[in-house]
Image (cartoon, rainbow, N blue to C red):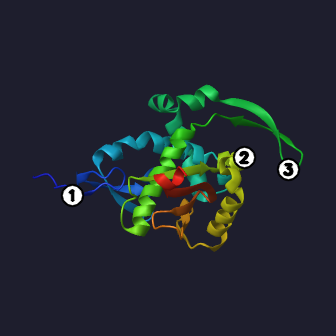
Amino acid sequence: MSKRKKKKGTCVYCGFQGPVTDDHVPPRSFYPKAPPRNLITVPSCETCNKTFAKDDDYARLVLTTAEGAVGNASRNELLPIVKRFAERAESKRILRTVYDSLRSAYYETPGGIFIRRQQFVLEGERLDAFAKRVIKALFYLEKRYRLPDDCTIHAINYRRMSEFEDLAGPNKDFYALILTELAEHAARRSWGDVFGYSWAQSPNYSDATWWLLDFYGRPQYLCNTLRDDVASE
């Protein structure tokens, strides 16, 4: 039997032209069972596809253990699978920073009750890398061309929102306006209760965009795309 011939195309992530496969966004592993049939797929080269696995596993662990995800049906169903994955020997190597930084402390709830909760140090670069990969796929989905190489993606995970004013600097009022627009006015697309997003086009130029990414029923990332020459101004 002859091997199935791979289709050719352009990788949305690195721009490689040649044999490509369909990359699922978000990954199929983010769903407890078979994902929706209309799950987003974009062309990806084999090299990029192989490099995503560790970041995907790490992001899934962080996003399913986020406080805001508690009560989400798909997250609750997926959690035992995530726990089994995290306890595997090979997974502990991937998640070494998590295990090395685990600690317990008491935290006061809004009702004045102190509860014991585990905390761990996040690897921000890995979380950002995951979000940037998703944004490249969504940009291609919405615009029908890959994000140009002279554009930069900026991603803010919700766990860094406490640093929001420092991150936004003098533009904090504008960022707050964008958040309101994305959360309340922009059209939202969703795939079950696992993933959804809304986005807005900047009037300045076509490659400038803003995105709000939801995972497991909670906004998890605020992202934008900007040309490097604009971003550096």
- Tell which tag, 2 or 1, sits nearer the viewer: 2
Name the image quarter holding residue 99. Answer: top right
What residue is shown with label 2? Answer: 162
Query: At 53% across and 71% down in the image, what residue appears?
Result: 203
Q: Secondary structure at mark 3?
A: loop
Instruction: Pinpoint residue 193: horizontal percent, then vertical percent.
Output: 57, 62
Q: Residue furthest top?
A: 100
Query: CA gap, disc 1 to disc 3?
Result: 55 Å
Query: CA gap, disc 3 to disc 2?
Result: 17 Å
Q: Residue furthest front?
A: 233
Q: Residues within 10 Å of mark 1 (few under 14, many from 20)?
A: some
What residue is shown with label 1? Answer: 8
What residue is shown with label 3? Answer: 110
* Kind of residue at disc 2: Ser
Query: CA gap, disc 2 to disc 1?
Result: 44 Å
Q: Earlier in the sequence, mark 3 or mark 2?
A: 3
- Tell which tag, 3 or 2, sits nearer the viewer: 2
Q: Secondary structure at mark 2?
A: helix
Q: Is residue 229 visible?
A: yes
Camera-side residue: 169 or 45?
169
* Kind of residue at disc 1: Lys
Q: Residue furthest right?
A: 112
Q: Secondary structure at mark 1?
A: strand
